[in-house]
Image (spheres, rainbow, N blue to C red):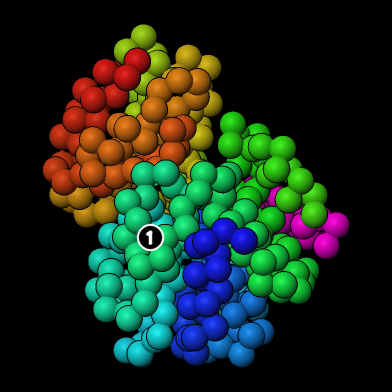
Amino acid sequence: MKKQIQQIIDAVKESQRILIVGHVSPDGDCFGSMFALGMELERQGKYVRTSAGEGLTDKYNFMRDYLNCCAAKDLDEEEFDLVIAVDTADDYRVGSILEPIFKKQPLKISIDHHMTNPGFSDINWVEERSATGELIYELLKEMDAPITVRTANALYAAIMTDTGNFIYSNTTPETLRLAAELVSIGAEVQMLAEEIYNKRSLGATKLMGAAIDTIKLYHDEKIAIMYADYAMIEGCGAVPADCESLINFAREIDTVEIAMLVREINKTRYKVSLRSKKYADVAQLAGFFGGGGHHFAAGCTLDGTMEEVMEKMLMKAEELI
Ligand code: AMP
Ligand code: MN
Ligand code: MN
């Protein structure tokens, strides 16, 4: 058994009250990993709370009965023996509300697949895999945990979303083997695809159109920038979580190597999502601005006006083309 897995199992054994946290703007890997792990820890008789961002988002509502995931602001002042951060590349990525709560816990564990993760916990299991869900599955197997249909759904959703439904370059033979195992256990492939990819509100649909309208191409049409601000999101009747996969529209343009989506956090702070296609290392680009991620998918947060942020990102992105 891997050293970190043994350490995690020992830490869990000695803990009764466990907090599981994920990153802001939580995605399928984040929710799926939190729930699969949290459900098993509850089965082991632990008191478990999970929290990430604004809590469960519509797209992942099919998991609402699996475990409660509260918004960071609704997490009660409670004492925990252990906190486990999943799919979270850096401590600040849990968000400004959870960060002090995370930091004050007596024992911290990090389970993550971002190679830019600096190892910010007492026990750090960081390994390059398609999704954190792959690591959670390995951990559950080492714990001899029963894998229920709910666990299989949560883990399948985690792996499916981070591999873009098994089409990104991070889809390895092992990823597909694990997914196949989850399907044989009962993961509901069609339901999950329907919920996650083939269903959206009218507001989210309109936001796709509005965001596509903002796309501009630079540098021989190899760099695409698009944006989404609150005025657009509200005007369309959408919610911020509907921005999750907008960047794909920019990435999918045939000439584009680097795609960027600039999202308003407030009028002087913006979150930038980065994607590349064949060669550009966007983790390095994000890292330059204090962010991180993977070679082909990364993110960072910048201060300034929307125009300033776009200008800075564009200048640096051009160096990678
Ligand atoms: P996103 O564009 O938010 O979908 O993020 C793309 C990938 O980069 C995901 O794996 C994120 O977890 C990671 N990521 C995004 N923002 C950051 C950041 N500020 N620091 C480290 N990793 C990030
Ligand atoms: Mn994630
Ligand atoms: Mn992930």
Q: Give percent across and percent down for residue 219.
A: 32, 13
Q: Main secondary structure of the magenta part?
A: helix
Query: Which residue is located at x 15 percent, y 41 percent?
Result: 305
Residue 175 point in image, percent of width and height: 68, 44
Image location of residue 248, percent across then percent down: 51, 35
Is residue 157 part of the magenta span, yes or no?
Answer: no
Residue toward you, 275 or 135: 135
Which amino acid, by three-letter code, is at mark 1?
Answer: Val
Q: Which picture quadrant has residue 139?
A: bottom right
User: x, y percentage for residue 181?
Assistant: 80, 54
Q: Is residue 281 left or right of residue 181?
A: left
What residue appears at the point 30 percent right and 37 percent down from the top-left corner?
Answer: 286
Q: Is residue 170 above or below residue 223?
A: below
Q: Which residue is mark 1?
A: 24
- Between residues 36 and 110, which one lies in front from this camera angle? 110
Magenta segment boundaries in residue numbering: 182-199
